[in-house]
Image: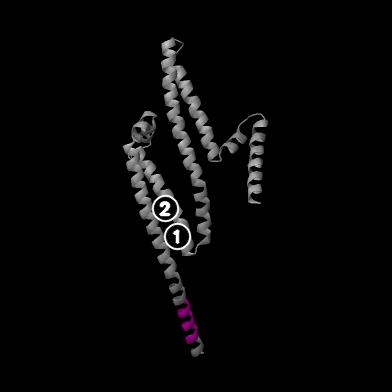
Amino acid sequence: MVQNWGQAILNALSNAVNLVLTFIPRLVGFLVILLVGWLIATLVSKALTLLLRKVGFDRISERIGLTRFEQRMGVKMDSAGILGKIVFWFILLIFLVPAADALGVPAVSNILNQLVAYIPNVFVAILVLFLGALTATVVADLVRGATASAKIGNPSLFATIARFAIIGFAVLIALEQLQIAPALIMLLPLPSPWPLDWEGRRRRVSGSIVGKAR
């Protein structure tokens, strides 16, 4: 009995040591990949922030009202710094996928893969909103100047209508990129062709993807 207990303890200790020795290389690989990702993300983030400040991105943000929105939200960072931080976390998240694989956690890797695959849609949506706001500001100034010169109605009113029309269109495009627009349209009390169009489009896109896969 004593020998059996002793052998069981030795086996348990041997298994524990094997687990530790097997896990250490995975942990080292995880930390190395994470460190490389952090260094690359930091360098790219700082370079992008510096480049945006050089080209006057902050002035553009102030022109379209983005800076005022940040101040209302209590954000102390400028627009270039915020975009640099977003890029930093995006790159770091990309490196987290192989880091999780090295650690041997497939469930975490699958979740991170899905998140990384969705993030480009977020970037496109942000770009669409930024360009939409910039275009809306320029068009509003043109409309205000043209209506004021022609002495037609209220120039500020026409400029506001033009601005919000363009921003609304940009928001719809951004929501479509985020795959939110179809769900919102389903909730709106619109005529039946609207949801059918979205559903038909979804089927056409799915069929195209399946055809390419084959």
Please tell me which residue is depicted at 66% across the width and 41% down the height of the picture.
203
Residue 74, can we see it?
Answer: no
Can you give x and y, in whole percent of width and height, for residue 193 in the image? 67, 31
Give, as a single range, the part of the protein colored magenta.
Answer: 6-15
6 on left or right of 183: left
Residue 76 percent across, percent down from the top left: 32, 39
Quadrant of the rendered structure where residue 21 is?
A: bottom left
Residue that numbered label 2 is attached to: 92
Residue 133, compared with residue 48, is above or below; it is above
User: Element type at marker 1?
Assistant: helix
* Crowd rating for badge 1 (residues with CA inside 10 Å; few <14, some 14–19, many 20+): many
Q: Quadrant of residue 145?
A: top left
Q: Secondary structure at mark 2?
A: helix
Q: Is residue 209 magenta?
A: no
Q: Is residue 168 left or right of residue 182?
A: left
Q: Eyeballing the image, is 140 above or below 53?
A: above
- Residue 99 shows which numbered tag? 1
Distance in Å between CA atoms under marks 2 and 1: 10 Å
Q: Residue at x 47, y 86 (%)?
A: 6
- Give the residue type at disc 2: Leu
Q: Earlier in the sequence, mark 2 or mark 1?
A: 2
